[in-house]
Image (spheres, rainbow, N blue to C red):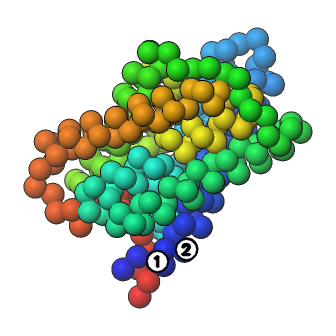
Amino acid sequence: MNPPLARRLVAECLGSAFLSAVVIGSGIAAANLSPDDGGLQLFENAAATAAGLFVIILMFGPVSGAHFNPVVSLVDASFGGLRWRDAFAYIPAQIGGCIAGAITANGMFALAAVSISTAHRASEAHLLSEVVATSGLVLVIFALARSNRAPLAPAAVGAYIGSAYFFTSSTSFANPAISAGRMFSDTFAGIAPASVPSYVVAQLIGGALAIMVLRVLYPDVDPRKAADPVIPRESTS
């Protein structure tokens, strides 16, 4: 049995807040530490995000499954690992957490609590990158879950996102909630509000493509064995 929904929502909100704070805070720090070297800034941001994801998933995974991403929750629901009503409850918790994390990151660096980003990112190459980044992330998570290797997910997800910062031109947002959170920080990791809707559409397309690939690669998996795609949730007994 799963922990109560309220406890899982707290975990999703807190985990999303930590994720957003790591992504945006490390981006601000990178811009301050390496103001004249964009490549080094990206490396610092990617390394902090990869390491942070690993730890955050370990912290909150046993409670909620450590989704922190509406696409992951929707894909989990499509495979029967999460009730649809729970998936739709996860989404506002994830978005709210990412926004709170962005505001916190701004405050930790003595910036305005809310500064709407002016970084327009929605080129065709960026949107293709988001489709690829999101589909790859979903494939990593659910391929491990559907082949009984879920304990490897924290390291695998961190490694994938860290590498995707470099092999995608969008720097791999791969997450509608973090896309929403990054709007609230006009810093290295920010994204202009006008770019977010197209990013979200691209991310949802990436998730849908990953579902099709997973059904081809793992057609005979019991949906119950694919539940809790990142870390199995604890029992309430």
Type of residue at label 1? Pro
Q: Quadrant of residue 202?
A: top left
Instruction: State the residue at coordinates (57%, 59%).
Output: 93
Q: Quadrant of residue 140?
A: top left
**Quick one: SS at disc 1?**
loop
User: Helix, strand or loop at disc 2?
Assistant: helix
Residue 146, relative to residue 102: is it above or below? below
Whether residue 50 can be seen here:
yes
Q: CA distance from mark 1 to mark 2?
A: 7 Å
Q: Name the residue beneath numbered marker 1.
A: 3
Vertical relation: 118 (above or below) 72: above
Residue 175 vs residue 49, the one in the foreground: 175
Query: Which quadrant of the structure image shows residue 43?
Result: top right
- Quarter holding the C terminus is bottom left
Using residue 164 as the reference point, say whether residue 53 is left or right of it.
Answer: right
Residue at image coords 83%, 43% = 113
Residue 45 visible in the snapshot:
no
Disc number placed over residue 156 in the picture, else none: none
Q: Are marks 1 and 2 in contact (CB under 8 Å)?
A: yes
Q: Please state, as top left, top right, bottom left or bottom right, where the N terminus lies in the image.
A: bottom left
| Left or right placement of residue 197 versus residue 36 in this view | left
Q: Amino acid at mark 2?
A: Arg
Give residue 7's mark.
2
Image coordinates for residue 26, horizontal then vertical, percent: 70, 35
Q: Residues within 10 Å of mark 2 (few under 14, many from 20)?
A: few
